[in-house]
Image (spheres, coloured by chain):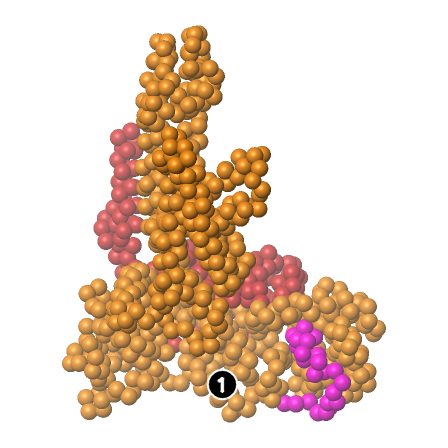
């Protein structure tokens, strides 16, 4: 990995002494403190090479260049954290509150669950969403809906997602948003998706149901040429 | 919208994939993306210094010179660069704005020159970043003030010109408020000042003992008693002048109530009232004591000087603003006085012929001691008394000395704080306004776009081109994104006004529909759902038909047009519907098992006979609402047949 963390990496390996006396603990504590301080000042990440990324994703070199330039401009440190995600989304959807959906989105982007999205994660997800096959896109969407990443979508998770989407609409909508609109939306969704009516939607059920629906298939082609 | 946001647009659009399985209507097609020429480097030549930047960087702010097509006017085809004959040093800041999104203010440049450059490049001064904003504003204000002073000094005491048709009243008021405007006002100003001084001096001199009069040479009298007539005449003259002035001010005041309540007018009244009371009260012995007391109030005439002196006014304001500190001083002093008085009283109690006859009597001693006056009229004689007396005087120094610097520093702090608070308030307002503007800008842009009928999927080509022409590529994509969200949730973005109308009409329509609708089931709270989520059973359809959403969307004026007009049954094409001047939208959800469209446009079907005579025009909104309800319940299947497919109902 092309991750460069400055002198951080040299401190990564902690040597364990056999006897753990007070002095040792104190020494560890000091080193952790130093590490933390270093970490705070030196979070800087450089992505892998252009060729590698081009091989891994479905973007051309020029597209990757444009993407990276924009990314680097906005996040000079090379990573995006959740706060920034939320702010970005809030700017796109100023009407309502986009933070919940941004949170779920962030978790979907952050595949390694590190709490920050690097350029590789960003570009990988974009590649799936914009240039991937239908199967890949649907799988990514399933991953988004599956909040706890257990492989199943249950009603609560769906409810959270739908509620988050409705939150983005804000207060001033036509027709007036009612309290149980999200719930009904979820019921509709589950009726369609849950084939065996067991209350959860598995990946296969999801894929199957989506592929049966022409609307969804058609819409999936919409976002092809975004760059 | 911040320039950097454009970078994230692909991410936001891609993330919209997450909405797809949930969307119950097909999402609109993406706007056609014209083949981008790729990212090219532009050369900008500013007076010989070449700056190179990506084209994308400049495109971030399409409403500036460099971001729009205006820069083509400066394009030099021979050299292939954009040439500007302007200051290259300033241009650096302008270009950095495009790069970073923050406009910084150069410290060493003249602020006027900077402003001119901003104006040339189409940048609004509000774009100056927060880091430099305060300094920018300060310098600008300084500049403006200096220029204003210069201008004023040039004009030879002309003063602001009065509007031509000003009344006598306005001129009079202006003369009173700004004595420098006209000679007469100045004369009046000095005359009143003179008479105030005369009156005060007369009050003072009145009490000086003069040599006795011829009648009683040995007896000394105050001058006031010796020359009663003279003083009375002087007093009368002064009071006449003051009364005249007061009445004139009262007449000229633009707001009489406010004038009556103002401090200055109260002072005026208090100054002249004793004289009149003295005139009215008969000269008998009983009330003469009270009459004499009233004379004390004549001293308030000195406060009339505050109109003439700026310093007095500032002092008054200071005292007012330091009231809490003064109050604290007073309170702590009182506490100390009571404590020490009590102690001294009990210490001196045993002594005979002591001055400390009671605790209140000891108050006087304590005050005199604590303020280090030390008159010596009351002196402790016991040892305990002397000890406590010394403690009292030491603590007096402390108690009094402590709050005074606090008051002084408080005053200076308050003064400076006021200045800074005003500045900050202005900046905060601007900042909030900027944020609100940006926010509402995006909101309004999208709503405006919708109103212009831009959301037509299959609208006629010219109209679409019309709406689309003025939007940048980024805006197109952003609006498409918002449109997708609308379709996913089957709800539309509206603005506050229509939302509150909808709320109002909803509550109104709900009631009437309950009472008047015949053919339908009772309307429940869920009846106001939009129609376009179709998988429910038929019950939904009926509830939908009763929904007053259609009524609510059209405001009351649309109902007016609805009432009593014959309409042609031919449904109009969607594009022309949307082109209606009214704020009406067609939430048409064109999915398979679709039930009915919510039509909010005043095109009622003519085939429902009860519609053409809605309830009497004077029947109010409720009646009309019910008629439209029935209309929609019966008529929806007939409306716009080519756009609505009815499922099995």
Chain B hue? Answer: orange
Toward which corner of the image does residue B285 lie, by quadrant? Answer: top right
Rendered position, A73 above or below B234: below
Q: Is residue B139 visible?
A: yes
Please tell me whether mark 1 sits on a helix, a strand or a loop.
helix
Give the residue displayed 48% in from the left and 60% down from the top: B249
- Please state which of residues A97 and B214 is positioned toward the viewer in this rendering: B214
Q: Which chain is red?
A: A
Q: Which residues, given as a range, are shown in magenta?
A: B551-573
Q: Horizontal placement of B382 versus B92: left or right?
A: right
Residue B199 inside the magenta-drawn segment? no
Give the residue displayed 37% in from the left and 13% down from the top: B380
- The location of residue A226, given as percent across then percent down, is 42, 77
- The location of residue A67, given as percent across then percent down, is 34, 71
Give the residue displayed 42% in from the left and 12% down from the top: B354
- Please state which of residues B444 and A122 is positioned toward the viewer in this rendering: B444
Toward which corner of the image does residue B193 lie, by quadrant? Answer: bottom left
Give the residue displayed 42% in from the left and 8% down from the top: B351
- What residue sits right under mark 1 in the picture? B467
């Amino acid at each position: 990995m092309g991750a460069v963390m400055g002198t951080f990496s040299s401190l990564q390996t902690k040597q364990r002494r056999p006897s753990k006396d007070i002095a040792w603990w104190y020494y560890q504590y000091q080193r952790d403190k130093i590490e933390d301080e270093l970490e705070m000042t030196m979070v800087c990440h450089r992505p892998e090479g252009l060729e590698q990324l081009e091989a891994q994703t479905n973007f051309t070199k020029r597209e990757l260049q444009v993407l990276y330039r924009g990314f680097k401009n906005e996040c000079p440190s090379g990573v995006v954290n959740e706060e920034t995600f939320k702010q970005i989304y809030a700017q796109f959807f100023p009407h309502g509150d986009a933070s919940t959906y941004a949170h779920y989105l962030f978790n979907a982007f952050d595949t390694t669950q590190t709490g920050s999205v690097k350029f590789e994660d960003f570009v990988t997800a974009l590649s799936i969403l914009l240039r991937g096959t239908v199967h890949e896109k649907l799988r990514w969407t399933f991953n988004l809906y599956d909040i706890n990443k257990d492989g199943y979508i249950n009603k609560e998770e769906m409810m959270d997602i739908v509620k988050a989407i409705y939150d983005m609409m804000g207060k001033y909508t036509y027709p007036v948003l009612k309290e149980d609109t999200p719930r009904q939306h979820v019921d509709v969704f589950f009726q369609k998706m849950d084939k065996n009516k067991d209350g959860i939607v598995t990946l296969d059920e999801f894929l199957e149901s989506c592929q049966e629906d022409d609307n969804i298939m058609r819409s999936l082609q919409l976002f092809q040429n975004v760059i | 919208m911040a320039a950097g946001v454009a970078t994230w647009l692909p991410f936001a659009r891609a993330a919209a994939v997450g909405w797809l399985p949930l969307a119950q209507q097909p999402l609109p097609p993406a706007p056609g993306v014209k083949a981008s020429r790729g990212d090219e480097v532009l050369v900008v030549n500013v007076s010989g210094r070449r700056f190179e930047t990506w084209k994308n960087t400049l495109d971030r702010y399409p409403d500036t010179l460099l971001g729009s097509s205006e820069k083509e006017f400066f394009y030099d085809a021979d050299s292939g660069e954009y040439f500007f004959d302007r200051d290259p040093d300033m241009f650096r800041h302008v270009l950095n704005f495009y790069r970073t999104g923050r406009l910084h203010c150069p410290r060493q440049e003249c602020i006027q020159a900077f402003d001119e450059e901003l104006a040339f490049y189409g940048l609004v001064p509000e774009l100056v970043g927060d880091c430099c904003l305060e300094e920018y504003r300060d310098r600008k204000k300084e500049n403006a003030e200096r220029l204003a002073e210069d201008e004023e000094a040039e004009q030879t005491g002309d003063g602001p010109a009065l509007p031509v048709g000003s009344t006598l009243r306005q001129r009079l008021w202006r003369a009173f408020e700004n004595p420098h405007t006209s000679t007469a006002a100045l004369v009046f100003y000095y005359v009143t000042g003179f008479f105030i001084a005369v009156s005060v001096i007369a009050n003072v001199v009145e009490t000086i003992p003069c040599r006795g009069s011829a009648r009683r040479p040995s007896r000394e009298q105050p001058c006031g008693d010796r020359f009663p007539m003279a003083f009375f005449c002087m007093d009368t003259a002064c009071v006449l002048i003051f009364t005249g002035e007061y009445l004139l001010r009262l007449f000229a005041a633009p707001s009489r109530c406010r004038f009556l309540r103002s401090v200055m007018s109260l002072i005026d009244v208090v100054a002249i009232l004793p004289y009149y009371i003295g005139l009215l009260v008969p000269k008998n012995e009983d009330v003469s004591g009270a009459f004499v007391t009233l004379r004390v109030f004549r001293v308030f005439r000195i406060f009339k000087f505050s109109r003439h002196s700026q310093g007095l006014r500032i002092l008054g304001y200071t005292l007012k603003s330091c009231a809490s500190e003064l109050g604290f001083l007073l309170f702590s002093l009182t506490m100390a006085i009571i404590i020490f008085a009590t102690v001294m009283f009990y210490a001196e109690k045993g002594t005979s012929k002591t001055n400390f006859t009671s605790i209140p009597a000891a108050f006087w001693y304590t005050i005199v001691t604590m303020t280090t006056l030390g008159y010596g009229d009351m002196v402790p004689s016991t040892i305990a008394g002397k000890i406590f007396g010394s403690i009292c005087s030491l603590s007096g120094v402390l108690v009094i000395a402590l709050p005074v610097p606090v008051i002084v520093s408080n005053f200076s702090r308050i003064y400076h704080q006021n200045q800074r608070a005003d500045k900050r308030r202005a900046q905060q307002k601007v900042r909030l306004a900027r944020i609100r503007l940006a926010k509402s800008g995006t909101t309004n842009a999208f709503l405006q776009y919708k109103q212009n009928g831009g959301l037509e999927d299959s609208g006629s080509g010219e109209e679409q081109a019309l709406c689309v022409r003025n939007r940048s590529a980024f805006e197109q994509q952003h609006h498409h994104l918002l449109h997708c969200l609308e379709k996913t949730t089957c709800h539309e973005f509206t603005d506050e006004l229509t939302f509150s109308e909808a709320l109002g009409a909803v509550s109104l329509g709900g009631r009437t529909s309950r009472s008047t609708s015949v053919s339908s089931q009772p309307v429940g709270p869920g009846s106001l759902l939009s129609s376009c989520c179709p998988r429910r059973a038929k019950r939904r359809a009926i509830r939908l038909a009763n929904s007053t959403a259609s009524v609510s969307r059209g405001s009351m004026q649309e109902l007016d047009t609805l009432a009593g007009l014959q309409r042609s049954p031919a449904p109009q094409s969607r594009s022309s519907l949307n082109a209606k001047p009214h704020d009406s939208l067609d939430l048409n959800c064109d999915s398979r098992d679709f039930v009915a469209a919510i039509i909010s446009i005043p095109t009622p079907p003519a085939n429902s006979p009860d519609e053409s005579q809605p309830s009497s025009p004077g029947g109010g909104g409720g009646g009309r609402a019910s008629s439209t309800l029935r209309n929609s319940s019966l008529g929806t299947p007939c409306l716009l047949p080519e756009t609505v497919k009815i499922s099995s109902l």
